[in-house]
Image (cartoon, helix red, strand yellow):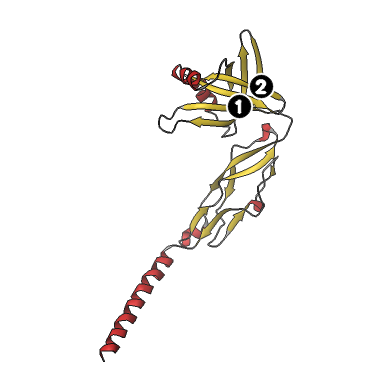
Amino acid sequence: MQRPILTAEIREGVGKEKAKKLRARGQIPAIFYGPRSQTIPLLIDSKELAKALQTEAGENVLIDLDIRKGDQSDRKVVMLKDIQIDPLKRMTLHTDFYEVTMDEMITVEVPVHLVGKPEGTKMGGILEQVRRVIQIQCLPGDIPKSIDIDVNPLKIGDSIHVQDIKVEKAKIISDSNFTIATVVPPVVEEKVAEAIIPEAVEGAEVKEKEEEKE
């Protein structure tokens, strides 16, 4: 799949006031870094960033970052490593871009999607997703959008662990004993048991009072 292209300009000057003025113009302060590159402060257009992230590649989207300074430009393949968003205004405040090399393995977290309806839920069981991401190691071009897990065969009491799954062209880094999903017994049974106990206690108290009267 073709990578989205995002244009960035080298940012002159740093500080809160400078960043505030940039955001008022629809620009976002950013930073570029990597194991083989020097850290570069950047500014990007907020609309261009939103467009670049609207892709089917999932959370680990690869971007061709076109870094410009005057008439010069340098293109780097990056991943969006961090994004800060104002919780009230819902606007992007800052982004971090991490350089990747297409022929070197990287470690990323990939979301887990449960597919299907477990057999156990037909008997009143409840499907619980314990883990929502799995850490894997692979080449940047082999990062899956998600890891889909079939939960149809699960009965009440059954679980799926990290060790039960495989990811094509990737090595799973997460602990193999971690539970991903499980089908637990119905909660109704617990509520019935809780209801019986108070009634039993109340009955015992009444009987005790009657014996005292005698």
Dot 1: within a 10 Å radius of its alpha carbon, few (fewer than 14), some, or many (20 or more) residues? Answer: many
Q: Where is residue 74 in the image (x, y as percent from the top left)?
A: 66, 16
Dot 2: within a 10 Å radius of its alpha carbon, few (fewer than 14), some, or many (20 or more) residues? Answer: some
The residue shown at (70%, 37%) is 138
The residue shown at (67%, 47%) is 166
Taking 41 as reference, is 156 above or below it? below
Amino acid on which disc 1 is placed:
Phe
Quarter where residue 190 is shown:
bottom left
Specify the quadrant that holds the C terminus: bottom left
Q: Which residue lies furthest to the bottom in this view?
A: 214
Eye-nearest disc, 1 or 2: 1
> Is 214 situated left or right of 155 in this image?
left
| Tag 1 and tag 2, C-beta contact below 8 Å | yes
Secondary structure of the residue carrying numbered label 1: strand
Q: Where is residue 11 in the image (x, y as percent from the top left)?
A: 57, 16
Depth check: give the residue in front, 184 or 173.
173
Answer whether residue 180 is visible to the viewer in this image: yes
